[in-house]
C-alpha cells in the first residue's frame, strides 16, 4: 500500500461496504473480516471497561483513553453567563467516565494529503 496512491472516497461507507472493500482488497472472506471487526470491538471493550487499563491504541491511527471525572456539588446563586445581572442554580453532577479518541500521526497525515 505504500507504493500506490490511495484514491479519495466521496461518500461515507456503511459497515457492509467497509467489510466488502476490505474483503476484496485482502482476499479474505466477508465472514472473516466481520470476525476481525467483532474481535477488535471486543478487544477495545476489554481495555476501556471499568477494571481495564483505560487505554487502547490502534497503532499509527488512533488512541482511545478513558478519564474519570469527579462529582460536582450543586451551586446556588451563580452569575448567569447568558443574562448578566441574573443569578442561577447549577445542579449537582454525578461522577462519570469520559472516553476520548485522539488521532495519531498517520491519521493526521491522511487528513492533510
Image (cartoon, helix red, strand yellow):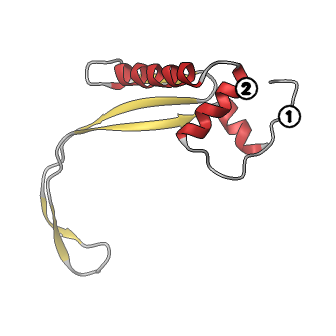
For residue 47, above or below residue 65: above
Tag 2's secondary structure?
helix
Q: Percent position (x, y) of residue 79?
A: 23, 71
The circle drawn on residue 23 is none
For residue 11, above or below residue 32: below
Q: Percent position (x, y) of residue 59?
A: 60, 21
Q: Is residue 106 visible?
A: yes
Q: Residue at x 51, y 25 (%)?
A: 34
Question: Considering depth in this image, is 103 or 46 the residue closer to the camera?
Answer: 46
Question: How far apart in space, not on screen, are marks 2 and 1 (Cα)?
Answer: 14 Å
Q: Percent position (x, y) of residue 6?
A: 80, 36
Q: Is residue 105 visible?
A: no
The disc, 2 or 1, on the residue closer to the chain's N-terminal end is 1
- Crowding near pointer 1: few (<14 within 10 Å), some, many (20+)? few
Q: Residue at x 16, y 45 (%)?
A: 94
Q: Residue at x 20, y 40 (%)?
A: 95
Q: Percent position (x, y) of residue 19?
A: 59, 31
The circle drawn on residue 25 is 2
Question: Considering depth in this image, is 26 or 106 the residue closer to the camera?
Answer: 26
Residue tagged 1: 5
Amino acid at each position: 500500500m505504500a507504493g500506490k496512491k490511495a484514491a479519495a472516497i466521496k461518500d461515507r461507507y456503511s459497515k457492509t461496504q467497509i467489510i466488502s472493500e476490505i474483503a476484496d482488497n485482502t482476499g479474505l472472506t466477508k465472514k472473516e473480516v466481520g470476525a476481525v471487526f467483532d474481535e477488535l470491538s471486543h478487544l477495545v471493550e476489554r481495555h476501556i471497561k471499568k477494571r481495564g487499563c483505560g487505554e487502547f491504541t490502534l497503532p499509527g491511527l488512533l488512541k482511545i483513553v478513558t478519564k474519570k471525572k469527579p462529582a460536582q456539588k450543586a451551586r446556588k446563586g451563580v452569575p448567569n453567563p447568558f443574562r448578566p445581572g441574573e443569578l442561577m442554580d447549577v445542579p449537582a453532577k454525578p461522577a462519570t467516565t469520559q472516553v476520548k479518541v485522539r488521532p495519531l500521526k498517520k491519521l493526521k497525515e491522511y487528513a492533510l494529503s
